[in-house]
């Protein structure tokens, strides 16, 4: 099988490539059989209500997402190794594994392999103090 071509971004020192930069403190996920979309936004107070204003969408094929997940995890774990564990407030953590394992009536149960992975990731990423 032929090797995939190597692509390099244009040299920014020459001024021919300037990426858009955004601050984001919220995200949403959309998936299809073909790809994975991340919608980044910024939480802003509009009147008396907090609204997530979308800033940009990034759509990745599943293979690229898998590579990105690997490097994101390595960087996060390295950061925590050097700087200490990042603790999240309970109110912004994902649904606890026990709730996923015992869904409310009418909700389909998750598969065992999914539950095992969910619990492993949850315990690794969101330890208790």
Image: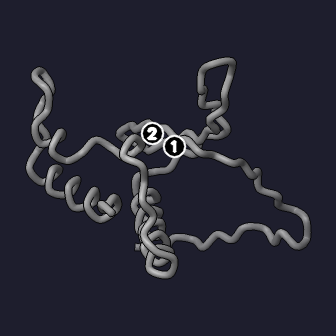
Earlier-in-chain disc, 1 versus 2: 2
Taking the view exactly as shown, the residue that stands out farthest to the front is 129
Residue beneath the point at 10% across and 37% down: 102
Where's residue 33, x and y in %?
35, 40
Q: Quadrant of the N terminus?
A: bottom left
Residue beneath the point at 60% across and 21% down: 49
Q: Quadrant of residue 108?
A: top left
In this rendered view, identify the residue nearer to me: 76 or 59.
76
The numbered dot on residue 38 is 1
Q: From the viewer's perspective, is 78 left or right of 112?
A: right
Where's residue 66, x and y in %?
39, 61
Where's residue 114, x and y in %?
17, 50
- Dot 2: what SS? strand
Residue placed under numbered mark 2 in the picture = 29
Where's residue 54, x and y in %?
63, 33
Residue beneath the point at 50% across and 81% down: 82
Q: Quadrant of residue 129?
A: bottom left
Residue beneath the point at 82% across and 61% down: 17
Report whether residue 2 is seen.
no
| Cβ atoms at labels 1 and 2 below 8 Å apart | yes
Q: Quadrant of residue 120?
A: bottom left
Tell me how far mark 1 sits from mark 2, CA to CA. Answer: 5 Å
- Dot 1: what SS? strand
In this rendered view, identify the residue nearer to me: 60 or 81.
81
């Amino acid at each position: 099988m032929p090797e995939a071509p190597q692509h390099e971004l244009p040299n920014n020192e020459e001024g021919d490539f300037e990426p858009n930069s955004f601050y984001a403190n919220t995200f949403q996920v959309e998936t299809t059989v073909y790809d994975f979309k991340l919608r980044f936004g910024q939480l802003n107070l509009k009147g008396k209500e907090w609204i997530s204003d979308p800033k940009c969408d990034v759509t990745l094929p599943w293979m690229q997402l898998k590579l990105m997940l690997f490097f994101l995890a390595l960087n996060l774990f390295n950061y925590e190794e050097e700087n200490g564990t990042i603790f999240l407030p309970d109110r912004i953590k994902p649904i606890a594994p026990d709730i996923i394992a015992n869904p409310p009536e009418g909700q389909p149960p998750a598969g065992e392999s999914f539950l095992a992975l969910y619990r492993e990731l949850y315990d690794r990423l969101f330890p208790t103090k």
